[in-house]
Image: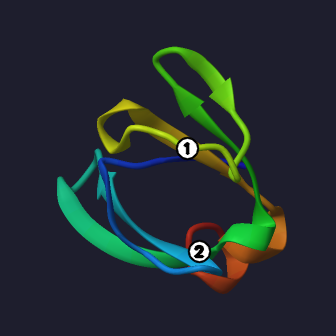
Amino acid sequence: MKLEITDIKKQTEKAILVETLDMDTLKKSEIWLPKSQIEFYHTFAGVQDVNSSYNRSEILAVEISEWIAKQKGLVN
């Protein structure tokens, strides 16, 4: 599942805190995602592996598994 994000707020060795925006309600949310469950980042320059260096302003979305999306309340 592709999760569109507006910012990466924090990062640890094992997880990132991302900010998302619900386009229907315009409500922002912050969600911690384990790096081990992120397949790749979508960037303006293409796709980068999660272990690569990146520019925070280039991040558009992260690819997450269906079970993580359910666990975080992003899908039913």
Q: How packed is label 1: few (under 14 Cα within 10 Å), some, or many (20 or more)? A: few
- Residue nearest the observer in this picture, 65 or 17: 17
Q: Nearer the viewer, residue 75 or 66?
A: 66
Label 2 environment density (alpha carbons within 10 Å; few <14, some 14–19, many ≥20): some
Residue at the left extreme, as displayed: 26
The quarter of the rendered structure image containing the C terminus is bottom right
Q: Residue at x 79, y 71 (%)?
A: 36
Q: Residue at x 38, y 31 (%)?
A: 58
The image's mark for residue 2 is none
Label 2 sits on a secondary structure element that is: strand
Q: Note whether 70 is above or below 52 in the view shown.
A: below
Q: Looking at the image, how many numbered discs can be counted on the residues?
A: 2
Q: Say what amino acid the circle numbered 1 marks.
A: Ser
Which numbered disc flags the more N-terminal residue, 2 or 1? 2
Residue 49's place in the image compared with 75, above or below, is above
SS class, disc 1: loop
Residue 7 location in percent, x, y? 30, 53
Q: Residue at x 46, y 17 (%)?
A: 44
Q: Position of residue 22 (x, y in %)?
A: 32, 54
Q: Is residue 71 above or below residue 2?
A: below
Q: Position of residue 5 (x, y in %)?
A: 40, 49
Q: Amino acid at mark 2?
A: Leu
How is the rendered protein coloured?
Answer: rainbow
Of residues 76 and 31, which is closer to you in this image?
A: 31
Q: Nearer the viewer, mark 2 or mark 1?
A: 1
The residue sitting at 68% across, 85% down in the picture is: 71
Between residue 32 and residue 2, name the one nearer to us. Answer: 32
Reading the image, the residue beneath label 1 is 53
Q: Name the residue that disc number 2 marks.
A: 33
* CB atoms of marks 2 and 1 within 8 Å: no
C-alpha separation, residue under disc 2 versus residue under disc 1: 17 Å
The percent position of residue 34, horizontal first and vertical second, equals 67, 77
